[in-house]
Image (spheres, rainbow, N blue to C red):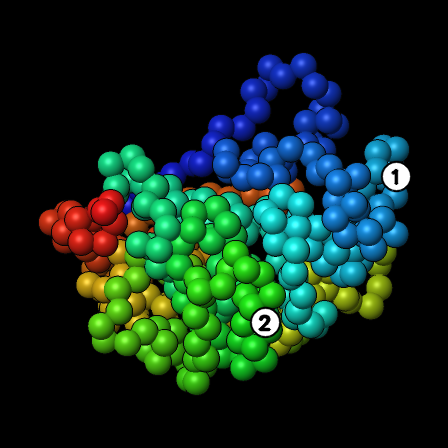
Amino acid sequence: MEVCSTQQISRPSLTSRRSHDERKKNQEKFRLHARNRNRERYDLKALTASIPALATYVKPNKHGVDSVDFASPAAVKLLNQALLHHYYGIPHWEFPDENLCPPVPGRADYIHAIADLLREKFFGNVPEGSRVTGLDVGVGASCIYPVLGIVEYGWNFIGSDISKNSIASAEQIVVANPALQGKVECRWQANPRSVFHGVLDDQEWVDFTMCNPPFHASAEEAEAGTRRKVRNLSGARGATPTMNFAGIHDELICEGGESQFIRNMIRESLNFSDRVFWFSTLVSKQAHLEGMYRSLQKAKALEVKTIPLGTGNKSTRIVAWTFLDKEQQKEWQISRWKQG
């Protein structure tokens, strides 16, 4: 098993003449992928013009600079709607408030990381358009990964979810935006214990899979995490937990938590080893990596890549693996990605 670690971009030089506070304030933007549309400071004037309701939540922070109230779930949702409208040309992105509201810049980094994985295997070029199909495991009510993958690279997507309501919401987003129509097929996963079985048929080839697994093993664990987030964002202790990125039970909690979900995914990926080029998942907890690597070694994955991601105070990573040998990869390039 070949294990590689990939650093996406270099961080700012320590010899920078900016003050420590300014470097810290801008750290998030410098850690985003080089092709991420939100690497620079948000243009709040343009964003509030796109979504006027956002203006209610824009106020000077402790440094006297206009900022969004990130402790407010309503503000976070409006901000991300404005980002998609202004920077990505997606004017309609609506879903129930109780569903997870994903942060667009971080989700875009996952899409760009997948593009880089494909480029490595395609002579330095990112294969674009409908010749590439991705599977988003747990597409969610927001349909965010297909939205970004289509806008950035024109890929096709299959989006699976165990929630019929989330599937219906994702389908509504596709219908509401002409740029997405005909590019996404949403499929209900009837068995919550399965990942790929019941979604992919015996004749389908998928160029990559991606997943943002449920983080927590229990409601108590999720609530504790929420309390920490509330304290970090507002400084308030003992406040009633309200997820600033929302999220219902199925999106945040599963039996065994993230670690067990990923182990199940690795085990099941073996059955699709010749029909998927890259399997991948986010891994939020570094402590889970060692067990994941053991599972991948046991499954006899031929190549494994770990790609660090980070925004603000949160660090995470993508782990991707393939069972294809060099000859199979070459055949895939010719049959799936070759132009014309």
- State the image coordinates of residue 243 (x, y, percent, origin top left): 72, 64
311 left or right of 58?
A: left
Disc 2 crowd, CA 10 A, few/some/many (<14, 14-19, 20+): some
Q: Nearer the viewer, residue 304 or 187?
A: 187
4 left or right of 253?
A: left
For mark 1, what is the residue? Answer: 60
Query: Measuring 54% from the left and 28% from the top, which residue is drawn there?
Result: 11
Q: Which mark is residue 172?
A: 2
Which residue sits furthest bottom?
190
Above or below 251: residue 233: above
Query: Measuring 79% from the left and 39% from the top, which residue is drawn there?
Result: 45
Q: Nearer the viewer, residue 271 or 153?
A: 153
Query: Measuring 14% from the left and 51% from the top, which residue is drawn there?
Result: 331
Quadrant in the rendering for residue 32: top right
Count of number-bearing discs? 2
Q: Which mark is residue 23?
A: none
- State the image coordinates of residue 86 (x, y, percent, origin top left): 67, 45
Quadrant in the rendering for residue 127: top left
